[in-house]
Amino acid sequence: QVQLVESGGGLVQSGGSLRLSCVASGNDFGIYPMGWYRQAPGEERDLIARIFRDGSTNYVDSVRGRFTVSRDNAKNAMYLEMNSLTPEDTAVYYCIMWTKQRNYWGRGTQVTVSS
């Protein structure tokens, strides 16, 4: 059973930065692609970044160039470096691991960007 735990959220001023972490329990962490979703109040949960087994990444347009996803397989961890934050980035951020059997989600971490 895989468990994902996010951390690093908080309150930041517009233009600031945050680094989110997602730590996974279990084995074979490096095999599976992982990603970050976010959900703003009253909105759907949207995928914003993915990182694959080979380290390749992709992003949605709204965060490309500002956010960077990375992973450290030795630490069973994935990160999201977020720069130039705006109030529109305010949301709960969730990490996800896609496996053959099922998808695993973390509980989320709140990011609030003040203007």
Image (cartoon, rainbow, N blue to C red):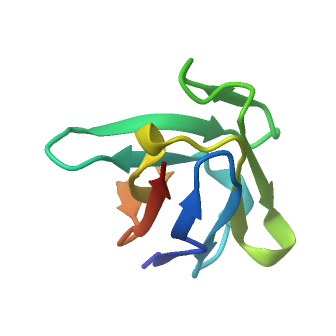
- Determine whether 105 is above or below 26 in the image: above
Above-or-below relation of 110 to 90 = below
Q: Is residue 95 visible?
A: no
> Could you say which is closer to the camera, residue 37 or residue 18?
18
Q: Is residue 113 left or right of residue 59?
A: left
Q: Hey, which residue is sitting farthest left in the picture?
A: 42
User: Is residue 13 in view?
Assistant: yes
- Tell me which corner region of the image, top left, top right, bottom left or bottom right, holds residue 76: bottom right
Tell me where residue 58 appears, x and y as whole percent.
66, 26
Task: Say which of 49 and 18 sits in front.
Answer: 18
Q: Is residue 66 left or right of residue 94?
A: right
In this rendered view, identify the residue nearer to me: 50 or 40.
Answer: 40
Q: Quadrant of the N terminus?
A: bottom left
- Is 37 situated above or below 109? above
Which residue lies most toward the front here? 115
| Residue 65 screen position, x and y as percent | 75, 26
- Residue 46: quadrant of the picture: top left
Q: Nearer the viewer, residue 42 or 28?
A: 42
Q: Residue at x 50, y 35 (%)?
A: 48
Percent from the top left, x then y, of residue 52?
Answer: 69, 39
Q: Give me the residue at 86% from left, 73% from top.
A: 74
Image point (39%, 62%), residue name: 104
Task: Say which residue appears at 42% left-offset and 38% top-offset.
Answer: 88
**Residue 73 falls left or right of residue 87:** right
How many numbered tags mark residues here?
0
